[in-house]
Amino acid sequence: MKGFTLLEMMIVAVIIAVLAAVALPYYYNAVESARMTEVVVLWGKGKGAVSGYELSQEQADRLSHRMEKANLKHFTGNVFCREGATGICWEAEFTQKGEPHARYKLVTTENFKKLACVPINGAGQSFCESQAVGEPVDINGEKTYIIKE
């Protein structure tokens, strides 16, 4: 009788499971990097125009409206005044839509000059670490990773 034995089939199943366990984190990071690109592009367009300048409430509202009109597919964005900041306080925050595997939010720092990743769950932590340029920093009590430009 020709065919595979149960042991051979179980070995193949174990090999496939190990390969999947190794490959899935890389796949999820690649998907999240692609999703994050829309925010990076939008942030890059506005960075030069607003960084280093103090915005009025009206200008911040217009910037929030522009983010809304940008029709981001995977994020929502808003501009806010960071609590406790003196002088220039405006930053942007991008929150994910839906319930993706890796949960995180993206925030600007140093008055729009840098973009940072704030993890929300364990998969988000791994993703933020993979995108970071250095050690995490504390921004408003949150562990935050500055993202590579």
Image: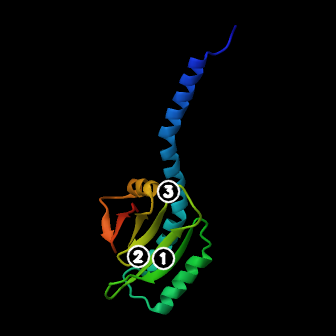
Question: Which residue is identified by label 3?
Answer: 102
Up-down: is 62 above or below 123?
Answer: below
Q: Amino acid at mark 1?
A: Gly
Front in this rendered view, residue 91 or 2: 2
Q: Are dots 3 and 1 in contact, CB under 8 Å?
A: no
Q: Which of pointers 1 and 2 indicates the residue nearer the eye?
A: 2
Q: Secondary structure at mark 2?
A: loop
Q: Residue furthest right?
A: 1
Q: Secondary structure at mark 3?
A: loop
Label for residue 46?
A: 1
Cα distance in 3D space between marks 1 and 2: 8 Å
Residue drawn at 47 percent across, 70 percent down = 44
Up-down: is 84 above or below 96?
Answer: below
Quarter of the image with the C terminus is bottom left
Cα distance in 3D space between marks 3 and 1: 26 Å
Q: Secondary structure at mark 1?
A: helix
Q: Earlier in the sequence, mark 3 or mark 1?
A: 1
Cα distance in 3D space between marks 3 and 2: 24 Å
Percent position (x, y) of residue 30?
A: 51, 51
Q: Amino acid at mark 3?
A: Ala
Residue drawn at 33 percent across, 72 percent down = 141
Local packing at callout 1 (Cα closer than 10 Å; few below 14, some 14-19, many 20+) is some
Q: For residue 4, which quarter of the picture?
A: top right
Local packing at callout 2 (Cα closer than 10 Å; few below 14, some 14-19, many 20+) is many
Q: Earlier in the sequence, mark 1 or mark 2?
A: 1
Q: Amino acid at mark 2?
A: Phe
Residue drawn at 70 percent across, 7 percent down = 1
Q: Are dots 1 and 2 in contact, CB under 8 Å?
A: yes
Percent position (x, y) of residue 26?
A: 48, 46
Question: Which residue is identified by label 2?
Answer: 112
